[in-house]
Image (cartoon, rainbow, N blue to C red):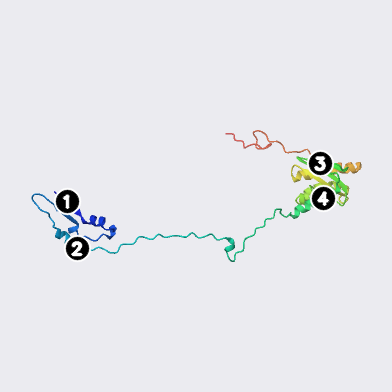
């Protein structure tokens, strides 16, 4: 019965070296066999073991332990420490500047209130006109022919449309009062076309309160007739009031 001893393992256990620093040992002496039996004696003597250890070369340089690296955390810079960069100053205005349109509307509102003390209901020359869904309350006062609709100039309010402006001025032009009365209007509902025709009816009704003699010329032009035409309702089974889907025989 025999025992093999691995010299590489013994050297690593005895000396504080890493596996990469283990000295090169020939394969012939890397394993030593110690055997004993009643037939054979020890295979390798102590002298051969001593000579094998003498043939080994150990490295005297042992790698030192790695030094611990310390990293210092940089301090955050403040805005005052930055040279050449002035601090930002943000100034926010709480109230925006009013637009010219708003200023003009405010001025016209003051002008209308000064001309109509007590509001529209307190005036004498007043007329109400309707067209489709639009309703217009009109007040006449002696003046230079200004027309103000909802505290805005009539040309601006009606977007400069010549037909709508003609609707508004036609009753005054019929009687020759286009530069004799100022017109103040409160209009609501519907579109601009319906409001323009409602204003025309309101002006014609207000002119009747100036004089009953104005009825004949206004009636002759059809300015006192309330136009009752409205959009016809949609019908079930049709696309619109009268438009039907395409007929297919088969």
As measured in the structure, the alpha-carbon distance from the residue carrying label 4 to the one carrying label 2 is 120 Å
Label 3 belongs to which residue? 129
Where does the image place residue 21, in percent across and percent down from the top left?
A: 28, 60
- In what element is the residue under mark 4? helix
Nearer the observer, disc 4 or disc 1?
A: 1
Question: Label 4: which residue?
Answer: 110
- Mark 1 and 3 residues: CB-CB less than 8 Å, in contact? no
Q: Residue at x 74, y 44 (%)?
A: 191
Q: Quadrant location of residue 208? A: top right
Marks 1 and 3 sit apart, C-alpha to C-alpha, by 127 Å
Secondary structure found at label 1: strand
Location of mark 2 (residue): 54
Task: From the viewer's perspective, tell me whether residue 85 is left or right of residue 140.
Answer: left
Which mark sits nearer the N-terminus, 4 or 3? 4
Label 2, label 3: how far apart the Cα atoms are: 129 Å
Q: Residues within 10 Å of mark 3 (few under 14, many from 20)?
A: many
Q: Residue at x 15, y 60 (%)?
A: 48
The tag earlier along the polypeptide, 1 or 2, is 1
Q: Earlier in the sequence, mark 4 or mark 2?
A: 2
Determine whether label 4 and label 2 are within 8 Å by CB: no
Q: Point out the tag, 2 or 3, that comes first from the N-terminus.
A: 2
Residue that mark 1 sits on: 3
Q: Position of residue 20 (x, y in %)?
A: 28, 59
Residue 87, given in percent of the width and then of the height, sits at 62, 61
Asked whether the beta carbons under mark 1 and mark 2 sit within 8 Å of each other, the answer is no
Give residue 21's mark: none
Q: Which of disc 3 and disc 1 is earlier in sequence?
A: 1
Measured as percent of width and height from the top left, residue 204 is found at 85, 43
- For the residues marked 1 and 2, what is the alpha-carbon distance in whole angstroms? 22 Å
**Residue 221, located in which quarter of the rendered image?**
top right
Crowd band around label 1 with a 10 angstrom C-alpha radius: few (<14), some (14–19), many (20+):
few
Q: Nearer the viewer, mark 4 or mark 2?
A: 2
């Amino acid at each position: 019965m025999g025992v093999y001893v691995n010299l590489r393992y013994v050297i690593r256990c005895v000396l504080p070296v890493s596996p990469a620093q283990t000295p090169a040992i020939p394969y012939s002496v890397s394993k030593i066999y110690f055997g004993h039996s009643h037939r054979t004696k020890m295979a390798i003597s102590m002298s051969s073991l001593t000579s094998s250890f003498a043939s080994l070369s150990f490295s005297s340089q042992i790698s030192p332990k790695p030094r611990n690296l310390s990293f210092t955390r940089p301090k955050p810079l403040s805005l005052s420490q930055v040279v050449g960069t002035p601090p930002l100053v943000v100034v926010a205005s709480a109230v925006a500047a009013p637009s010219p349109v708003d200023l003009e509307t405010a001025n016209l509102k003051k002008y209308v209130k000064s001309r109509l003390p007590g509001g529209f209901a307190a005036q004498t020359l007043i007329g109400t006109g309707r067209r489709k869904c639009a309703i217009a309350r009109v007040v006449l006062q002696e003046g230079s022919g200004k027309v103000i609709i909802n505290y805005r100039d009539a040309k601006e309010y009606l977007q400069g449309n010549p037909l709508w402006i003609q609707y508004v001025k036609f009753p005054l032009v019929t009687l020759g009062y286009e530069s004799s009365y100022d017109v103040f209007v409160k209009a609501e509902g519907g579109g601009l076309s319906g409001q323009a025709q409602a204003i025309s009816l309101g002006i014609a009704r207000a002119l009747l309160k100036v004089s009953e003699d104005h009825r004949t010329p206004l009636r002759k032009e059809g300015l006192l007739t309330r136009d009752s035409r409205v959009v016809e309702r949609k019908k079930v089974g049709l696309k619109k009031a009268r438009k039907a889907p395409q007929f297919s025989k088969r």
